[in-house]
């Protein structure tokens, strides 16, 4: 499908996956107030075709890198994406100690010390994703990780609850860089047919990081104190930077082609490569605003993006609700202390790992099988069957978890239920992210839109979770969530599978 501009303001920007701008982008060189182009009209198409043909075979094109070089960059990004969400939950088992240390008695405020991270984690990609398209993915990822290290140390030594909340907010903002840029890096490196495994590993970070966090945090809090959980996260971030700074290479094709064009001292070629960055046709502030608004345009201008993002956000909200309620549930019902209570998150982690191994392979096999039946041509909707399969496990896990805890059955039963939920969650996250990357012209912005939505619900759900379970019980509360998961997770993906291509054909935001 022909690429189109994804901004309703109709100011084109180079495609995230195609290094050459569209003919429409070339036409902006002649718009009033943006300066005339010295390229004759009859030469523009020829130049564009030549540039595109040359880039497809260029060894500097990230998709032509060696497998080891591709996976080195993908591995670094996945490491960053693991460390950052680790910060979000590592303090979860220590919430009672946080309340005691700072004299907090309000349950909502206690929960907010954990979940405020997710507010800025939602806001950050709106700024960092477009900045990565202006200045490159590598700079944003490396610099933001260094800043995150400093803010985590600020959390460790925060003198008041207000200071802790402030530093947690800032950690979330700078720590969102891997979410803002990581999916774009995977898209830069791998073609549609090859990216399932890399996307699965990348997607594992935001899910397994918050699971590992409480396991570490529980024992650290119990043995040496709550402030050391933040110091440990800062140390993990430092290790990530020690690996990432020397290894991670720039992958965003327009930036790479711009640098090549600059070295060639050919301004006309540079204008073709990335017109909004190298000419006076529009200011960088205007460009930032256009890109800043793009995730919101994608989210509210595309029903497909909105519904898939809503489903992801709903599951993410439940996920963080579990973080804030596990400690109370297993302490009150099963008598677990802080250290042992951290181990209860292993069920979620096992579910995620099993889904990563199984779903990555099956999702790719389904995609290749359907592509073969379609004459070798892949379509984004071929990602949806894997999503539908995974969506059945989400309500099953919630019903199992809630009612086994309600009945006070052996402690392994709610942990198994949480693992089934984790399997379903990961099995749906992967195909949704692959679909967004395949279907939308601006992959990083589409993923940022979904990230914003899910982080907002991840912040909101823990604030009312205790009250819901107090009113409905663990069985009733999780049954309500399971019923909503059925409504959101099954009918609409089936509709997308059959009608998604028609919806994309009508959209200005999609491929």
Image (cartoon, rainbow, N blue to C red):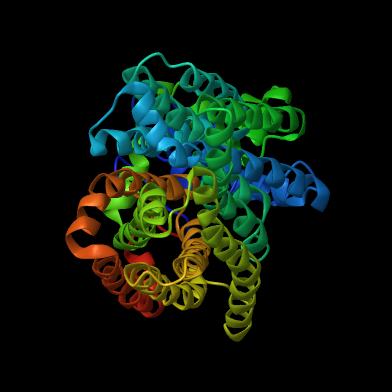
Specify whether residue 180 is in view.
yes
Give the vertical position of 300 relative to 285 (above or below).
below
User: Quick one: 187 or 116, which is closer to the camera?
Assistant: 116
* Apparent side of residue 481 relative to residue 144 in the rendered image (left or right): left
The residue depicted at 51 percent of the width and 24 percent of the height is 227
In the rendered image, residue 446, in percent from the top left (x then y), is placed at 43, 50
| Residue 111 in which image quadrant | top left
Tell which of 249 and 355 is nearer to you.
355
The x and y percentages for residue 106 are: 22, 34
Counting the numbered discs, the total is: 0
Q: Give percent across and percent down for residue 481.
A: 28, 66
Residue closest to the eye, 297 or 44: 297
x and y percent of residue 41 in the render?
Answer: 50, 41
Closest to the observer, 280 or 215: 215
The residue furthest top is: 159
Outermost residue, front side? 335
Q: Is residue 439 left or right of residue 455?
A: right
- On screen, residue 216 above or below 174: below
Q: Which residue is drawn at 40% across and 68% down?
A: 401
Q: Which residue is drawn at 61% across and 24% down?
A: 267
Residue at 66% from the left image edge and 35% from the top image edge:
257
From this viewpoint, is residue 58 visible? no
């Amino acid at each position: 499908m022909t690429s189109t501009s994804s901004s309703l303001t109709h100011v084109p920007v180079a495609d995230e996956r195609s290094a050459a701008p569209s003919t429409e982008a070339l036409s902006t060189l002649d718009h009033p107030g943006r300066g005339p182009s010295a390229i004759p009209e009859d030469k523009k198409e020829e130049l564009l075709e030549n540039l595109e043909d040359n880039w497809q075979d260029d060894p500097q094109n990230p998709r032509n890198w060696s497998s080891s070089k591709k996976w080195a960059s993908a591995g670094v990004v996945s490491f960053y994406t693991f460390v950052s969400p680790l910060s979000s939950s590592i303090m979860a088992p220590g919430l009672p100690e946080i309340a005691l240390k700072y004299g907090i008695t309000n349950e909502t405020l206690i929960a907010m010390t954990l979940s405020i991270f997710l507010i800025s984690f939602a806001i950050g990609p709106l700024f960092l994703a477009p900045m990565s398209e202006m200045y490159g993915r590598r700079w944003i990822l490396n610099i933001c990780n260094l800043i995150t290290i400093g803010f985590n140390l600020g959390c460790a030594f925060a003198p008041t609850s207000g200071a802790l909340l402030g530093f947690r907010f800032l950690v979330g903002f700078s720590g969102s860089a891997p979410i803002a840029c990581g999916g774009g890096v995977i898209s830069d490196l791998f073609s549609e047919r090859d990216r399932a495994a890399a996307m699965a590993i990348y997607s594992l970070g935001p899910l397994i990081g918050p699971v590992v966090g409480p396991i570490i945090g529980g024992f650290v809090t119990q043995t040496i104190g709550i402030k050391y959980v933040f110091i440990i996260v800062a140390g993990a971030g430092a290790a990530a930077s020690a690996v990432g700074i020397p290894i991670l290479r720039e992958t965003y094709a327009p930036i790479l082609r711009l640098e090549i064009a600059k070295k060639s001292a050919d301004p006309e070629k540079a204008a073709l490569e990335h017109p909004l960055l190298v000419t006076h046709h529009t200011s960088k502030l205007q460009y930032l605003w256009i890109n800043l608004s793009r995730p919101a345009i994608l989210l509210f201008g595309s029903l497909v993006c909105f519904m898939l993002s809503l489903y992801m956000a709903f599951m993410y909200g439940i996920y963080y609700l579990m973080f804030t309620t596990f400690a109370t549930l297993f302490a009150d019902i099963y008598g677990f202390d802080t250290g042992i209570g951290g181990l209860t998150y292993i069920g979620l982690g096992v579910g995620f790992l099993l889904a990563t191994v199984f779903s990555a392979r099956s999702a790719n096999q389904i995609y290749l099988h359907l592509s073969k039946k379609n004459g070798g041509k892949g379509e984004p909707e071929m990602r949806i069957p894997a999503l539908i399969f995974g969506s059945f496990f989400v309500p099953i896990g919630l019903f199992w978890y809630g009612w086994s805890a309600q009945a006070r059955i052996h402690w392994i039963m709610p942990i198994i239920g949480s693992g089934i939920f984790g399997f379903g969650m990961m099995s749906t996250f992967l195909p949704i992210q692959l679909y967004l990357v395949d279907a939308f012209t601006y992959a990083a912005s589409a993923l940022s839109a979904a990230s914003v939505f899910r982080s907002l619900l991840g912040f909101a759900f823990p604030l009312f979770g205790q009250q819901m379970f107090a009113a409905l019980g663990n069985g009733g509360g999780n049954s309500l969530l399971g019923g909503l998961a059925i409504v959101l997770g099954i009918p609409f993906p089936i509709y997308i599978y059959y009608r998604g291509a028609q919806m994309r054909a009508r959209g200005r935001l999609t491929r």
